[in-house]
Amino acid sequence: MELILITILFLGLIVLGVPIAFSIGVASLAGIASISGVPNTMIPMKMFYGLNSYVLLAVPLFVLTANIMNQGNISRKLIDFSVALAGRKPGGLGHANVIVSMLFAGVSGSSTADTAGVGKILIPNMIEKGYSREMSVGVTAASSTIGSIIPPSITMVIYGGLTNTSVGSLFIGGIVPGLLIGFGMMAVVSYYAKRDNLPVMERVSRAEFIALLKDSIPAMITPLIIIGGIVFGVFTPTEAAAFSAIYAYLISAFYYKTISYKDLPQIFVETLKLSCLSLFALAAASALGEFLGYFQINAMVAEFFNGLGSSKFLFLFIIVLFFLFIGTFMDAIPAMVLFVPVIYPVALSLGVDPIQLGIIIIVTLSIGLVTPPYGLCLLISSVIGDLSLDKSFKAVIPYISVIGLVLLAVMFVPAILLVA
């Protein structure tokens, strides 16, 4: 009975518009308080334990990297290069939008940072050049989801911390799916370019292209340094996040000369705001997970899947549907903290590779970034493009289908993960 009441309370708070982190916290407090013999001090203890992880220190550091990149206008450098690279193709700005999202993903590890940094530049530019608002908003929002798939990825760090899975292996596993999604979205842009006769940008000169390439190289080599350093044992994922933040500041301050030490206080404040929201949700979810543990939810889930048989693919299909639903109203981090510890033991018992499971969950939850009512990338893009939410969602549906196809490939051809 307690479990039903707490579930109703949790859903009621979400419907009332209470932020998800606080909804989880209130549900945790009420749930543990309803269990006799369990002191309320269990809640702060579990919240602290949920954050007491060296791996999770990478989260605010990657957020810091993204904020430095945006403040230092590095996204502008990547956009200029991407436009020069793809602008001469029909629908060139759409292609450039996807390319810069793939490049920015390898630098910041944050989809929402990608949407804000790229969208505020490219969406108005695309509309000015004759692209429809639907096209401009749709491709920007959808391509931003690549930020959580191409390494480095904050959600991969969270999954690795929850399951003790190698974050370096997760980073490697996300490379091919992320690239496939990017190329698939570019194919969608090509279709629209032919159908709607989208404009072609003026070809840049060879000298100008080389200059833009040189200007972008310091930013573009960041993911190579991070992933290479992790794979070859030079540093841990957390150390890699710290290095990326320092590197982002150094190239912004001394190479591009777009920020100074006077900008750091504002950058730190913005980083704290974003990081505290995500990490508080993670801490609250850890406390709620303790409450669910008293009702042996793990055993109930295992019993449910055992009743369906031992089909690994049926399990993965159900997991995809479940996280598609959860992603519509919950951020990826609290969703993983709440449910990954429950399904992970079942997945192992069915022979599912931890890397494959992690990539499937992360890719599925990335779709939630562009599905209402919670989809942050969709909301940010629609505001920038001054387009209603329903029209914005219709515009991203073709790109969501691309993500779905890649998701099926990960399910049935795990070899593309390079590590599974």
Image: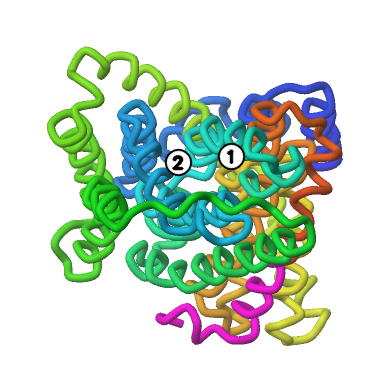
Start-end of magenta stretch? 402-420
Residue 220 placed where, x, y %?
29, 54
Quadrant of the image occupied by residue 194: bottom right
- Mostly what secondary structure, the magenta segment? helix
For image coordinates 40% across by 80% down, the residue present is 419
Classify mark 2: helix, strand or loop.
helix
Instruction: Tell me the distance, in whole angstroms, between the alpha carbons under discs 1 and 2.
Output: 8 Å
Q: Position of residue 88 (x, y in %)?
A: 51, 58
Look at mark 1 in the image and give the residue it sits on.
Answer: 285
Residue 13 horizontal side relative to residue 218, left or right: right
The amino acid beneath tag 2 is Gly
Q: Residue at x 56, y 49 (%)?
A: 93
The answer to whether 310 appears left or right of 178 in the picture is right
Instruction: Please tell me how crowded label 1 is: few (under 14), some (14-19), or many (20+) other residues with Cα within 10 Å.
Output: many
> Which of the numbered marks, if any, corresponds to residue 50?
2
Q: Position of residue 288 (x, y in %)?
A: 62, 39
196 and 32: which is toward the camera? 196
Quadrant for the N terminus, please.
Answer: top right
Taking the image as shown, residue 35 lies to the left or right of residue 7, namely left
Q: Residue sitting at 38 percent across and 54 percent down?
A: 106
Q: Are marks 1 and 2 in contact (CB under 8 Å)?
A: yes
Kind of residue sitting beneath label 1: Ala
